[in-house]
Image (cartoon, rainbow, N blue to C red):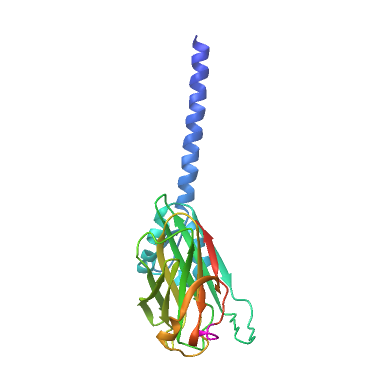
Amino acid sequence: MKKPRRKILFILLICLFSLMTTIRVMALNRCEYYENSNGVILTKDEYDIIIEAYGKNYFDRMSQNDYEWFEDLFMENSSIEINTYYDVAITPMGTSYSTANKKISIIKSCSTSRCTIMTTATWLSNPKVRSYDVIGSRFNGTALANNSITTRVQSSNGIEYFDNLKQYSNGFGVSVKLPTGATDIIIDQKFYVNPSGTVFASYQHATKSISLATSKLYTLGVSGYGDVFCFYGNALGVFDQMGGVHITL
């Protein structure tokens, strides 16, 4: 009788050791971090997301207040996904014009009850035209989890928030004014949706000076610029038709 008991005890000890090893590995992975000169500390997963969406220069100057923008994204759960689109050519073709100096990223982090979505348009060089651009999303099989949509423009001039919202049943857009004379321009948008379906995101840059009213002449549809914005009236031929990004929830 002693031998079977010893065997069972030995098996239990092996199982316990395996469980402790797994927990330790998970804890070590979670504790991997990078720290910048402002004392902002990120896990490796957080760091990878920041670098992909914003670039290393952003992390180097990131403040604790900046980190708070990402907190609910990082807190939803450990599964974070990002898709990025880069403009790749300068090609004037009739009403089509794309600029090769910016990128757009969409990031998701989901819990069982909602997904945090962040869209980021990053200028890789300084835009010549500083007018009203449009950033927004179209939904397929999902909807806003609440009406909290936050849109901001970061630059060397600081941070400015915009609420020029135009909302539809299948998504929304917000017009933002690019800051005059500023560098390091980043347009951010954060909102929450139900954890199902697909979100399509688009950032459209005005290639000439326009009014706020003109920037809001659009509907949302699959045939729109970036799979989102269908411009009409005086807004036709104004925006650069940059490709969009999407993410499945």
Magenta residues (range)? 235-239
Residue 110 seen: yes
Residue 47 x/y as whole percent: 48, 61
Q: Give the residue at x 59% y 76%.
A: 87
Q: Give the residue at x 53% y 61%.
A: 247
Asked if residue 195 is positioned above or below residue 22 in the image, the reply reads: below
Asked if residue 211 is positioned above or below residue 198 in the image, the reply reads: below
Residue 28 in the figure: left or right of residue 241: left
Residue 185 x/y as whole percent: 46, 79
Q: Which quadrant holds residue 150? A: bottom left
Q: Main secondary structure of the magenta part?
A: loop
Q: Give the residue at x 49% y 32%.
A: 17
Q: Which sits in the foreground, 63 or 240?
A: 240
Residue 143 in the figure: left or right of residue 85: left
Asked if residue 156 is positioned above or below residue 188 in the image, the reply reads: below
Residue 185 seen: no
Q: Which sits in the foreground, 5 or 186?
A: 186
